[in-house]
Amino acid sequence: MLKKFFVVTLLAVAIIFVGNNSASAKDVYVGTSNTTGRDCYLMTETIHDYFKGAHAHYIDATLKMIRRSDGNVQYLDYSFVDSPHPYFRNSQGFEGTADKYKTPIEWNMFWEMQNYL
């Protein structure tokens, strides 16, 4: 009887552990790039926030970009600084202030990251 209890308890813990890990990782659609035409997704499992300094909040994340025609996937790593306006830089060297109209993918990424954190 004790052996059955142990097995059932172990199974329940394993299910809870696996369930928590799968729920935390997802790709959130943040728009379609006007430049590349690719659908862009924020990979929530890559969001990492940290502080450096009294007035700056730093956040890193990865953007997944998928070409609809053939499913080709590319990734861009981003770093954001929220001080006082969201400023970003990506792994291709593109940088600037996130703006709803001029850089909508980065704008949406920033606000999704804020919602996630």
Image (cartoon, rainbow, N blue to C red):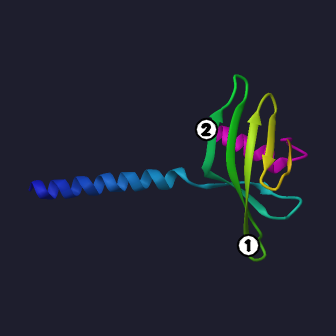
Magenta-highlighted stretch: main secondary structure? helix
Q: Is residue 116 left or right of residue 29?
A: left
> In the visual, does 15 lie left or right of 78?
left
Q: Secondary structure at mark 1?
A: loop
Residue shown at the point (62%, 51%) measured from the top left:
46
Image height check: is 52 above or below 3?
above
Q: Position of residue 97 (x, y in %)?
A: 86, 39
Could you say where residue 101 lies in the image, as x and y percent from the top left? 89, 45
In the rendered image, the vertical position of residue 84 relative to residue 110, given as above or below: above
Q: CA distance from mark 1 to mark 2?
A: 29 Å
Badge 2: residue crowd in 10 Å (few <14, some 14–19, many ≥20)? few
Report the label total.
2
Instruction: Specify whether residue 61 is painted magenta.
Output: no
Q: Which residues are magenta?
A: 97-117
Q: The N terminus is located in which quarter? A: bottom left
Which residue: 86% across, 41% down?
A: 99
Which quadrant holds the C terminus?
top right
Q: Can you give x and y, in whole percent of width and height, for residue 64 in the image?
A: 70, 60
Q: Nearer the viewer, residue 26 or 81?
A: 81
Image spot of residue 58 (x, y percent): 70, 36
Examine the image and state in which quarter residue 48 appears.
top right
* Residue position for label 1: 72
- The amino acid sitting under disc 1 is Asn
- The three-letter code of the residue at mark 2 reads Leu
- The residue carrying mark 2 is 117
* Picture disc at residue 52: none
